[in-house]
Image (tube, rainbow, N blue to C red):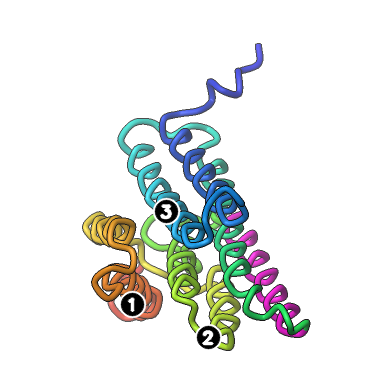
């Protein structure tokens, strides 16, 4: 007798689905005429951050309760929606309006985002096959999403966002090794995400920029730390 697909799901899988739903809502809110323009970016930005929190929570729940047969695949699909597609659409929405008069800039932007999507698909599709206990191969999709999300939310210059999209995308699908953060580090990241959700651009935008700096330090310093200070068997 065949198993029911629904019965394959665990509590952690339901959180992964919430992650994907948040990513989907982040895209919808950008193009909803029912939402005033000044709130669209804030809502989309917030839902991508909520998706990141859900992504962290599903891993914790999976370890504490039960890991299902489809959990790893479901998590990769959810991350694809919220951390690759939603982030790419977010970047396009912000910058396409500013370059509407330039066909060449549109081509550059679309090319960079397609490359980012390509790297993201490769990274997430390969994640389970290349999973290691103590380190990640390639920059985690969550770190990539946070860096690009904050840069675009604060509308850094167009000439800077394009190389950032390509470099960070390539880092996701690279063979660079990044250490897995311990629980305390993940907790700090979660607190910074929550503060960013609450404070947004208040108090000189300190919360999102602290989050950005923390993730950037991990992205740059993580491989250095792993190479020189972590001993492999």
Q: CA distance from mark 2 to mark 1?
A: 21 Å
Write down the residue under mark 3. 52
Give the farthest residue toward the bottom: 159
- At label 1, counting other C-alpha atoms closer than 10 Å, the crowd grade (few under 14, some 14-19, many 20 or more) is few
Q: Is residue 93 visible?
A: yes
Q: x%, y% of residue 51?
A: 45, 50
- Residue 217 disc label: 1
Q: Give the class, few, some or many, for how many residues have Cα within 10 Å of label 2's Cα (few <14, many ≥20).
A: few
Quick check: can you spot residue 79? no
Residue 45 point in image, percent of width and height: 46, 59
Name the quadrant containing residue 88. Answer: bottom right
Where in the figure is residue 136, as x and y percent of width and height?
A: 44, 63
Instruction: Depth check: give the residue in front, 205 or 137.
Output: 205
Would you place residue 131 above or below residue 213 in this image? above
State which region is magenta.
104-125
Tell me residue 151's x, y (percent): 46, 75
Mark closest to the chain's N terminus, 3 or 1:
3
**Tag 1, which secondary structure?**
helix
Cα separation between marks 2 and 3: 25 Å
Q: Quadrant of residue 99?
A: bottom right
């Amino acid at each position: 007798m065949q198993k029911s697909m629904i019965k394959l799901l665990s509590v952690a899988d339901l959180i992964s689905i919430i992650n994907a739903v948040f990513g989907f809502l982040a895209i919808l809110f950008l193009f909803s005429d029912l939402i005033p323009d000044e709130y669209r970016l804030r809502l989309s930005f917030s839902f991508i951050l909520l998706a990141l929190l859900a992504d962290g929570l599903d891993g914790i729940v999976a370890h504490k309760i039960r890991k299902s047969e489809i959990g790893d695949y479901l998590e990769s699909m959810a991350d694809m929606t919220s951390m690759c597609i939603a982030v790419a659409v977010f970047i396009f929405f912000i910058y396409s309006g500013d370059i509407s008069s330039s066909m060449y800039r549109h081509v550059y932007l679309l090319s960079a985002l397609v490359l980012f999507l390509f790297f993201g698909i490769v990274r997430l599709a390969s994640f389970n096959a290349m999973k290691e206990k103590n380190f990640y191969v390639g920059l985690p999709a969550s770190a990539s999403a946070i860096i690009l999300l904050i840069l675009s939310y604060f509308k850094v210059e167009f000439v800077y966002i394009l190389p950032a999209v390509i470099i960070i995308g390539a880092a996701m699908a690279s063979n660079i090794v990044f250490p897995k953060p311990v629980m305390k580090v993940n907790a700090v990241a979660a607190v910074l995400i929550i503060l960013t959700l609450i404070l947004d651009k208040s108090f000189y935008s300190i919360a999102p920029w602290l989050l950005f700096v923390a993730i950037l330090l991990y992205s740059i310093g993580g491989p250095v730390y792993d190479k020189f200070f972590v001993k492999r068997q």
